[in-house]
Image (cartoon, rainbow, N blue to C red):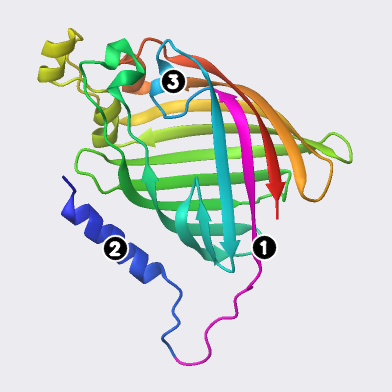
Protein backbone atom coordinates (compact mmCIF):
# COMPACT_ATOMS: atom_id res chain seq x y z
CA UNK A 1 0.00 0.00 0.00
CA UNK A 2 1.35 3.41 -0.94
CA UNK A 3 1.13 6.70 0.91
CA UNK A 4 -0.91 8.97 -1.39
CA UNK A 5 0.13 12.17 0.42
CA UNK A 6 3.84 11.32 0.25
CA UNK A 7 3.62 10.47 -3.47
CA UNK A 8 1.77 13.72 -4.17
CA UNK A 9 4.50 15.69 -2.40
CA UNK A 10 7.13 13.81 -4.37
CA UNK A 11 5.35 14.52 -7.67
CA UNK A 12 4.95 18.22 -6.87
CA UNK A 13 8.58 18.54 -5.84
CA UNK A 14 9.69 16.87 -9.06
CA UNK A 15 7.47 19.05 -11.27
CA UNK A 16 8.50 22.35 -9.68
CA UNK A 17 12.17 21.36 -9.71
CA UNK A 18 12.28 20.73 -13.46
CA UNK A 19 14.12 23.31 -15.57
CA UNK A 20 11.69 26.00 -16.66
CA UNK A 21 11.64 25.74 -20.45
CA UNK A 22 8.13 27.08 -20.93
CA UNK A 23 8.95 30.72 -20.20
CA UNK A 24 9.95 33.44 -22.64
CA UNK A 25 13.28 33.25 -24.44
CA UNK A 26 15.27 30.32 -25.69
CA UNK A 27 15.59 27.10 -23.69
CA UNK A 28 18.88 26.64 -21.82
CA UNK A 29 21.77 25.25 -23.81
CA UNK A 30 22.63 21.74 -22.63
CA UNK A 31 25.83 19.83 -23.26
CA UNK A 32 24.77 17.04 -25.68
CA UNK A 33 27.79 14.90 -24.80
CA UNK A 34 27.22 11.56 -23.12
CA UNK A 35 29.46 10.83 -20.13
CA UNK A 36 29.63 8.60 -17.10
CA UNK A 37 31.17 5.39 -15.80
CA UNK A 38 30.58 1.70 -15.27
CA UNK A 39 32.25 -0.13 -12.40
CA UNK A 40 32.32 -3.67 -11.06
CA UNK A 41 33.91 -5.07 -7.94
CA UNK A 42 33.64 -7.09 -4.78
CA UNK A 43 32.71 -5.71 -1.37
CA UNK A 44 32.65 -7.10 2.14
CA UNK A 45 30.01 -5.18 4.00
CA UNK A 46 26.44 -3.98 3.77
CA UNK A 47 24.59 -4.52 0.54
CA UNK A 48 21.41 -3.35 2.24
CA UNK A 49 21.67 -1.28 5.37
CA UNK A 50 20.53 -3.88 7.90
CA UNK A 51 21.22 -7.35 6.49
CA UNK A 52 24.95 -6.98 6.98
CA UNK A 53 24.60 -6.28 10.71
CA UNK A 54 23.67 -9.92 11.12
CA UNK A 55 26.31 -12.61 11.70
CA UNK A 56 26.85 -13.55 8.06
CA UNK A 57 29.35 -11.15 6.53
CA UNK A 58 29.92 -12.17 2.94
CA UNK A 59 31.87 -11.04 -0.08
CA UNK A 60 29.29 -9.81 -2.58
CA UNK A 61 29.71 -8.62 -6.18
CA UNK A 62 28.88 -4.99 -6.91
CA UNK A 63 27.83 -3.15 -10.04
CA UNK A 64 27.38 0.60 -10.33
CA UNK A 65 26.91 2.99 -13.21
CA UNK A 66 26.28 6.62 -14.07
CA UNK A 67 25.21 7.89 -17.47
CA UNK A 68 24.59 11.60 -18.00
CA UNK A 69 23.82 14.01 -20.79
CA UNK A 70 23.59 17.69 -20.05
CA UNK A 71 21.76 18.07 -16.74
CA UNK A 72 20.02 14.69 -16.89
CA UNK A 73 21.38 11.40 -15.57
CA UNK A 74 20.62 7.77 -14.81
CA UNK A 75 22.52 6.24 -11.91
CA UNK A 76 22.44 3.06 -9.86
CA UNK A 77 22.86 5.14 -6.69
CA UNK A 78 21.01 8.38 -7.51
CA UNK A 79 18.20 7.01 -9.67
CA UNK A 80 16.81 8.82 -12.69
CA UNK A 81 17.02 12.58 -12.35
CA UNK A 82 18.56 15.90 -13.19
CA UNK A 83 20.89 18.56 -11.82
CA UNK A 84 18.93 21.31 -10.09
CA UNK A 85 22.03 23.40 -9.38
CA UNK A 86 25.40 23.12 -11.12
CA UNK A 87 28.04 25.55 -9.90
CA UNK A 88 31.81 25.63 -9.61
CA UNK A 89 31.72 24.17 -6.11
CA UNK A 90 28.11 23.08 -5.47
CA UNK A 91 25.96 20.51 -7.23
CA UNK A 92 22.39 19.68 -6.24
CA UNK A 93 20.46 16.87 -7.92
CA UNK A 94 16.91 15.56 -7.69
CA UNK A 95 15.70 12.21 -8.86
CA UNK A 96 13.42 9.23 -8.51
CA UNK A 97 14.78 5.80 -7.65
CA UNK A 98 14.14 2.45 -6.01
CA UNK A 99 15.18 1.76 -2.43
CA UNK A 100 15.93 -1.79 -1.38
CA UNK A 101 14.07 -3.60 1.36
CA UNK A 102 15.08 -6.70 3.31
CA UNK A 103 14.45 -10.41 2.78
CA UNK A 104 13.47 -12.65 5.67
CA UNK A 105 15.70 -15.32 4.16
CA UNK A 106 18.83 -13.26 4.86
CA UNK A 107 19.09 -14.70 8.37
CA UNK A 108 17.44 -17.24 10.67
CA UNK A 109 16.68 -14.38 13.04
CA UNK A 110 14.67 -12.60 10.33
CA UNK A 111 12.81 -15.72 9.23
CA UNK A 112 9.66 -15.03 11.26
CA UNK A 113 9.75 -11.24 10.90
CA UNK A 114 8.75 -11.18 7.24
CA UNK A 115 10.14 -9.17 4.35
CA UNK A 116 10.60 -5.41 4.29
CA UNK A 117 9.46 -4.48 0.81
CA UNK A 118 11.44 -2.16 -1.40
CA UNK A 119 9.91 1.10 -2.53
CA UNK A 120 10.17 3.80 -5.13
CA UNK A 121 10.87 7.28 -3.84
CA UNK A 122 12.53 10.63 -4.33
CA UNK A 123 16.18 11.47 -3.68
CA UNK A 124 17.87 14.87 -3.36
CA UNK A 125 21.66 15.04 -3.17
CA UNK A 126 24.03 17.90 -2.45
CA UNK A 127 27.77 17.92 -3.06
CA UNK A 128 29.86 20.90 -1.93
CA UNK A 129 33.49 20.88 -2.97
CA UNK A 130 34.71 23.17 -0.24
CA UNK A 131 38.39 22.73 -1.17
CA UNK A 132 38.13 21.15 -4.60
CA UNK A 133 39.28 17.53 -4.58
CA UNK A 134 40.86 18.02 -1.13
CA UNK A 135 37.56 18.28 0.76
CA UNK A 136 33.96 17.91 -0.20
CA UNK A 137 30.82 17.63 1.89
CA UNK A 138 27.77 15.69 0.74
CA UNK A 139 24.23 14.81 1.76
CA UNK A 140 21.55 12.39 0.55
CA UNK A 141 17.90 12.91 1.48
CA UNK A 142 15.39 10.30 0.38
CA UNK A 143 11.68 9.77 0.98
CA UNK A 144 9.85 6.60 -0.06
CA UNK A 145 6.31 6.19 -1.36
CA UNK A 146 5.37 3.02 0.52
CA UNK A 147 3.24 3.61 3.62
CA UNK A 148 5.39 1.52 5.98
CA UNK A 149 8.64 3.06 4.73
CA UNK A 150 9.86 6.52 5.66
CA UNK A 151 12.68 8.97 5.02
CA UNK A 152 16.39 9.03 5.76
CA UNK A 153 19.24 11.52 5.60
CA UNK A 154 22.95 10.84 5.13
CA UNK A 155 25.56 13.51 5.89
CA UNK A 156 29.24 13.01 5.14
CA UNK A 157 32.58 14.48 4.18
CA UNK A 158 35.45 13.18 2.04
CA UNK A 159 39.05 14.25 2.51
CA UNK A 160 41.25 13.63 -0.53
CA UNK A 161 45.04 13.61 -0.64
CA UNK A 162 47.63 12.87 -3.36
CA UNK A 163 49.96 9.87 -3.12
CA UNK A 164 51.73 10.20 -6.45
CA UNK A 165 50.91 11.23 -10.01
CA UNK A 166 48.67 8.26 -10.69
CA UNK A 167 47.41 7.44 -7.20
CA UNK A 168 45.20 9.36 -4.78
CA UNK A 169 43.87 8.58 -1.33
CA UNK A 170 40.66 9.49 0.45
CA UNK A 171 38.92 9.27 3.82
CA UNK A 172 35.13 9.26 4.07
CA UNK A 173 33.18 9.86 7.29
CA UNK A 174 29.37 9.77 7.25
CA UNK A 175 26.33 9.47 9.49
CA UNK A 176 22.81 8.30 8.69
CA UNK A 177 19.56 9.46 10.27
CA UNK A 178 16.00 8.23 9.73
CA UNK A 179 12.48 8.96 10.88
CA UNK A 180 10.43 6.66 13.11
CA UNK A 181 8.69 4.90 10.19
CA UNK A 182 11.88 3.93 8.38
CA UNK A 183 13.62 2.89 11.59
CA UNK A 184 10.66 0.76 12.64
CA UNK A 185 10.52 -0.98 9.25
CA UNK A 186 14.07 -2.34 9.63
CA UNK A 187 14.73 -2.44 13.37
CA UNK A 188 11.33 -2.64 15.07
CA UNK A 189 9.51 -5.75 16.30
CA UNK A 190 5.70 -5.66 16.38
CA UNK A 191 3.64 -7.74 18.86
CA UNK A 192 2.80 -10.23 16.09
CA UNK A 193 6.43 -10.51 14.99
CA UNK A 194 7.45 -10.97 18.62
CA UNK A 195 4.97 -13.81 19.04
CA UNK A 196 6.17 -15.55 15.88
CA UNK A 197 9.90 -15.09 16.36
CA UNK A 198 10.35 -15.07 20.12
CA UNK A 199 12.19 -11.74 19.88
CA UNK A 200 11.37 -8.99 22.35
CA UNK A 201 8.83 -6.42 21.18
CA UNK A 202 10.66 -3.24 20.18
CA UNK A 203 9.41 0.19 19.09
CA UNK A 204 12.27 2.50 18.02
CA UNK A 205 11.86 6.25 17.81
CA UNK A 206 14.17 7.02 14.91
CA UNK A 207 17.02 9.51 14.85
CA UNK A 208 20.74 8.74 14.54
CA UNK A 209 21.09 5.25 13.03
CA UNK A 210 24.61 4.66 11.79
CA UNK A 211 28.15 6.01 11.40
CA UNK A 212 30.64 4.89 8.78
CA UNK A 213 34.33 5.48 8.23
CA UNK A 214 36.33 4.33 5.20
CA UNK A 215 39.80 5.01 3.85
CA UNK A 216 40.93 4.06 0.38
CA UNK A 217 43.22 4.48 -2.60
CA UNK A 218 42.43 4.90 -6.28
CA UNK A 219 45.01 4.20 -8.98
CA UNK A 220 44.40 5.56 -12.47
CA UNK A 221 46.57 4.11 -15.23
CA UNK A 222 44.79 5.90 -18.09
CA UNK A 223 42.17 8.56 -18.64
CA UNK A 224 39.51 5.86 -18.80
CA UNK A 225 40.58 3.05 -16.47
CA UNK A 226 41.10 3.04 -12.70
CA UNK A 227 41.05 0.61 -9.80
CA UNK A 228 40.29 1.47 -6.17
CA UNK A 229 40.25 -0.31 -2.84
CA UNK A 230 38.99 0.66 0.59
CA UNK A 231 38.73 -0.49 4.22
CA UNK A 232 36.57 0.80 7.02
CA UNK A 233 33.97 0.17 9.66
CA UNK A 234 30.24 0.66 10.17
CA UNK A 235 28.58 1.19 13.56
CA UNK A 236 24.90 1.32 14.49
CA UNK A 237 23.77 4.12 16.79
CA UNK A 238 20.74 5.06 18.86
CA UNK A 239 17.74 2.75 19.00
CA UNK A 240 19.05 0.73 16.05
CA UNK A 241 22.04 -0.42 18.11
CA UNK A 242 19.68 -1.83 20.77
CA UNK A 243 17.25 -3.56 18.42
CA UNK A 244 16.67 -7.30 19.01
CA UNK A 245 16.65 -7.72 15.22
CA UNK A 246 20.43 -7.33 14.98
CA UNK A 247 23.12 -9.60 16.38
CA UNK A 248 26.01 -7.16 16.08
CA UNK A 249 26.11 -3.38 15.99
CA UNK A 250 29.41 -2.95 14.16
CA UNK A 251 31.23 -4.62 11.33
CA UNK A 252 34.24 -4.13 9.04
CA UNK A 253 33.87 -2.79 5.51
CA UNK A 254 36.09 -3.34 2.50
CA UNK A 255 36.10 -3.68 -1.24
CA UNK A 256 37.91 -3.40 -4.55
CA UNK A 257 36.41 -1.79 -7.67
CA UNK A 258 37.40 -1.55 -11.33
CA UNK A 259 36.00 1.51 -13.14
CA UNK A 260 35.71 2.42 -16.84
CA UNK A 261 35.03 6.11 -17.46
CA UNK A 262 33.66 7.41 -20.77
Q: Horizontal and vertical percent for residue 28? A: 55, 81
Which tag is nearer the camera, tag 2 or tag 1?
A: 2
Residue contact between numbered discs 2 and 3, judged by CB atoms under 8 Å: no
Q: Which mark is residue 52?
A: 3
Question: Is residue 68 depicted above or below 201 in this figure?
Answer: below
Q: Residue at x 51, y 22 (%)?
A: 234
Quarter of the image where one finds residue 110: top left
- Which quadrant does the C terminus fall into? bottom right
**Position of residue 70 in the picture relative to residue 166 (left or right):** left
- Whether 34 is among the magenta residues is yes
**Position of residue 225 in the picture relative to residue 74 (left or right):** right
Quarter of the image where one finds residue 18: bottom left
Q: Residue at x 46, y 74 (%)?
A: 19
**Position of residue 164 in the picture relative to residue 252 (left or right):** right
Disc 1 versus disc 3: distance between alpha carbons?
Answer: 37 Å
Disc 2 versus disc 1: distance between alpha carbons?
Answer: 29 Å
Tell me the SS state at disc 1. loop
Question: Is residue 115 depicted above or below 227 in this figure?
Answer: above
The residue beneath circle 1 is 88
Please tell me which residue lies in front, 130 or 242: 242
Part of the protein shown in magenta: 24-44
Total marks in image:
3
- Which quadrant does the N terminus fall into? top left
Sequence order check, earlier mark of 2 and 1 = 2
Estimate how packed mark 1 is, as few (under 14), some (14 to 19) or many (20 or more) residues with alpha carbons within 10 Å: few
Q: Which mark is residue 11?
A: 2
Q: Residue at x 44, y 53 (%)?
A: 124
Amino acid sequence: MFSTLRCRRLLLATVFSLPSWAGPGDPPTLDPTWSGFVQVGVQRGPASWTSSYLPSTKNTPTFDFLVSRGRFFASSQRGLGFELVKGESITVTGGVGYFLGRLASESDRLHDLGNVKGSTGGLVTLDWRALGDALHVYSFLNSTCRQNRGSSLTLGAVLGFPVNESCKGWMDVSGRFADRTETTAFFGVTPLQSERSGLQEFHPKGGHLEDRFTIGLVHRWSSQWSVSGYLGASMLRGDAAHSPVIERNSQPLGGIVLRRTF
